[in-house]
Image (tube, rainbow, N blue to C red):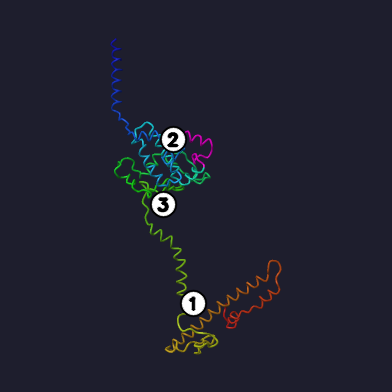
Amino acid sequence: MSSAKASGSDAKGGSAQNRKANNDAPERRYTVEQKAEVLRIRRCEPTAFYDILSLESVRKTATDADIKKAYRKLSLATHPDKNGHEFADEAFKMVSRAFGVLGDKEKREKYDRFGGDPDSRFGGQQQQQQQNPFSGFARRHPADGMGGAGWQQEMTPEEMFQRFFGGGGFGGGFGGGPFGAFDTGPQFVFNMGGGPGIRVHQFGGARPQRRPRAANEPEQSGSALQTILGLLPIILFFIIPVLTSLFSGSGTDQPAGPRMVYDQPMPPYTEHRQTPSYKVDYFVNPDDIASFSESKLTQLDKTAESNLVRLLRRECESEERTKQRLIDDAYGWIFPDQKKMERANQYEMPACQRIHNMGLRR
């Protein structure tokens, strides 16, 4: 009897301890509004994404900002850390899945056109998705569509929530910190994915944002130097020809100085002079050389000869190209045209002939 009493006493003590432990457990609280949102969302079809986000009435006109605003409101209302309702977690996942589809431009277009879950490729998958709308968060599929090396990992609802609100969770409270993004409106940027070989989706924002750096990832430096190095080939492409032209003097027929004509005078170029080596007659304007000294006139003669040689060679190259074009045209597709070939062979090349007579190489 003593042992039975002891056992009964122990049982009563254990029950008392259990009741005390249950009383000490924190009570999961929620407001009337939070409960109403959870129940409303659970009444929606798993793929009624507009209805889940309370956008069914404006589904054709809803903007990205409207979708983000709806997700911001409902994710906060249904997040299990702030909503103690027993079905809050399920509602939170449905809200996240709806935003994952409608917040992606490509997926939203497919959903508006075909309905159902745009990530489902086959009927069996679609049926499974309708039964469990949250399975898509843990699914992997190739980023390139061909089963390549790059893979895209779908976010979990919690990861999506952390990304959307800046990764701060509820630690900063609702008065500021990570939730300062509430006032950003349409300019708020939400990136999904990122990293090597992984596609990045951006919802909203004026321009693409870089993916967030990991805590142990060093900050990139030297961006200005990289920009300059990237532009260096373009700079060299334009600068080198200009410098070459300036130093070689090949950009013009003759350098700066008195203008001249060759062989025959042409008013006002009537002052006769002669090149030193090839004894070619050339003429300049008397007013242009009135103040020239003998040494400067000697230099002018050398310059005139250099300009003439350069001019003749350039004209000779043009004549050779023209003659070759005439010969090619004379051959035709099948049989050569004798008349055209005769005209090509008779084509005169005075500049080339003069170079030959002067004993110059072409």
Residue 340 lies, in percent from the top left, at 68, 74
Q: Is residue 9 above or below residue 249?
A: above
Q: CA distance from mark 2 to mark 3?
A: 34 Å
Residue at mark 2: 44
Q: Amino acid at mark 2?
A: Cys
| First in sequence: mark 2 vs mark 3 | 2
Residue 114 lies, in percent from the top left, at 52, 42
Residue 345 lies, in percent from the top left, at 66, 76
Mark number displayed over residue 303 = none
In the foreground, 24 or 42: 42
Residue pushed farthest top?
1
Residue pushed farthest front?
57
Residue at mark 3: 208
Q: Residue drawn 45% across and 80% down?
A: 256
In the foreground, 362 or 100: 100
Query: Which stretch did the figure color magenta?
Result: 114-134
Residue at mark 1: 252
